[in-house]
Image (cartoon, rainbow, N blue to C red):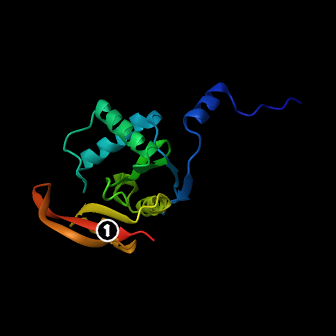
Amino acid sequence: MLKSRPASSGANLFKAKMFPKPIAKFISKKGREIEIWEPSMERLDALLVFVNRLVEDDTFLTLTGRPKTRVEEEAWLKENLDYAKQGQGYMVWAIYDGKIIGQSDFRRGGTRDWHTCTIGLMIDRDFRGEGIGRFLLEHILKKAKEMKIKIAKLYLFDDNEIAKKLYQKFGFREFARLPKGFYRQGRYSDALQMYKVIR
């Protein structure tokens, strides 16, 4: 009886080369298996879809009110990949069913504040409330510690209560507030800055 060969065709080998393997996996609160990947240019189109869904959603982010172009996202991704190679930053994507559904990143400071970083966190509207943001935040804080970063900072809208509570649970504290620093959907919000000492 002939045995079937494993599905290790040239196409599969090419796919394995493009996307080696996720750096982590976890099950969300809704039972979905989420994979965590480091970024790559091969997922540029998926990134463009993810970002423009956030723009369309007009959520608590500083993204502009117009869709991003492929050229813009390609330049942005190249820049951030270069930062990562130079040890100046780090970024991961949460992926489900081949789609980018979350992103977290940080960028280090300059010469005088190299020991600090600024964190960003974004989750697609269809995946919020599943614990994905918490998992991503925990992951990048561990990475920041590995890179000898001592202080993590972030910016957020004061009325983004869900994000604020998440950051507070991780030990972030407010250290600055700019009254009416953000404008969104016809109203002003205070711009908060929070920090966490990484131990």
Residue 137 drawn at (x, y percent)? 42, 61
Position of 147 with respect to 111 (left or right) is right
Q: Is residue 53 above or below residue 153?
A: above
Residue 86 drawn at (x, y percent)? 43, 44
Q: Image point 63% across, 31% down: which residue? A: 12
Residue 73 drawn at (x, y percent)? 32, 36
Q: Quadrant of residue 46?
A: top left
Q: Image point 86% across, 29% down: which residue? A: 2
Q: Residue furthest top?
A: 10
Position of 57 with respect to 3 (left or right) is left
Position of 142 with respect to 44 (left or right) is right
Q: Residue furthest right?
A: 1
User: Label 1's element?
Assistant: strand
Q: Quadrant of the N terminus?
A: top right
Q: Residue furthest front?
A: 111
Q: Is residue 194 above or below residue 90?
A: below
Q: Quadrant of residue 177?
A: bottom left
Q: Quadrant of the C terminus?
A: bottom left
Q: Nearer the viewer, residue 109 or 26?
A: 109
Q: Image point 48% across, 60% down: which residue? A: 139
Residue 194 drawn at (x, y percent)? 28, 68
Local packing at callout 1 (Cα closer than 10 Å; few below 14, some 14-19, many 20+) is many
Name the amino acid, label 1. Answer: Tyr
* Residue that badge 1 annotates: 195
